[in-house]
Amino acid sequence: FTGRREYALAHFADIDSMKAKELCRVMNDCSEQRDKLNLRIQAYMDLFDIHLPKGLKNVYSNKAMAYLKSLDHPALTIMVEDMASAMAHIETSREGLESLFKDNEDVQNLMSIKGIALQTAATIYTAIDGIERFETPESLVSYFGLKITRHESGGDRDLHGHINKRGDPLVRKYLANVVVKHSIYYPDSDLAGFYKRKKEVMPHWKAVTAAMRKLVCIIWAMLTRHQVYRFSSPVKA
């Protein structure tokens, strides 16, 4: 430790980019609130042995929410109304993102990757805020907090590295979700294959992190070249 302090040049996004980024955050917060309320509602229904009428599979439909609100359970009514409010905000946020990015080629290209819908694509795109700021895929990997800090142990470096976690945690969350989706729903994809190979030599979450870095390299190439996903990585992770 030298006692010297490192400084990074500040980057100021334009107003529209900042608005889009905050809209992505609001949508994520509302999604998390909806999911938490769903779990609380399910627990409440189990506690009081409440069942939905035949034909209703979950509590998200208008019919299911109307039924639950018709019961003599004030706490349940409040939770259902809160969940309905969160869902309405999610839809408003989605409409806002669709309006902002309907003509954005880069966001549409990101959505060509299986497992990446508008919310994830917009979150990643607004977090990057200009791919020209990153000269190499490695610089974007580092920006997202996925750069490995190596610690040698018994001659094995890979199994004892740790990511720096300096970037946006929401982006890392979404990148991890994409990798997990590929491993489950798209097992024949290049990303799933990369994860499986890493899983053979390292623990699950380290393999996921390695695949996240691979995905970031793919994203860097796509945005740099303004291309859709080609089902093979043009750069190495």
Image (cartoon, helix red, strand yellow):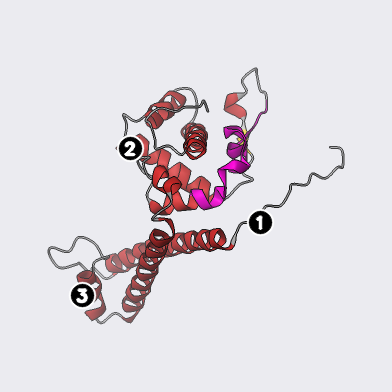
Residue position marked by numbered label 3 in the rendering? 67
Image position, residue 21 (x, y; %): 52, 58
Can residue 75 be seen here? The reply is: yes
190, 109: nearer the viewer: 109
Residue at 30 percent across and 68 percent down: it is 47
Residue position marked by numbered label 1 in the rendering? 12
Q: In front of the other: label 1 or label 2?
A: 1
Q: Which mark is residue 184?
A: 2
Which one is earlier in the sequence, the residue at label 3 or at label 1? 1
Can residue 146 be seen here? The reply is: no
Q: Which mark is residue 171?
A: none
Image position, residue 165 (x, y; %): 61, 44
Tell me which amino acid carries mark 1: Phe
Residue at 53 percent across and 63 percent down: it is 19
Q: Label 3 neighbourhood size at 10 Å, few (<14), some (14-19), many (20+)?
A: some
Tell me which amino acid carries mark 2: Ile
Q: Which residues are magenta?
A: 124-151
CA gap between label 2 and label 3 equals 34 Å
Count up the numbered dots. Answer: 3
Q: In front of the other: label 2 or label 3?
A: 2
Magenta stretch encompasses residue 69 = no
CA gap between label 1 and label 2 equals 38 Å
119, 57: nearer the viewer: 119
- Which part of the image, by quadrant, shows the N terminus? top right
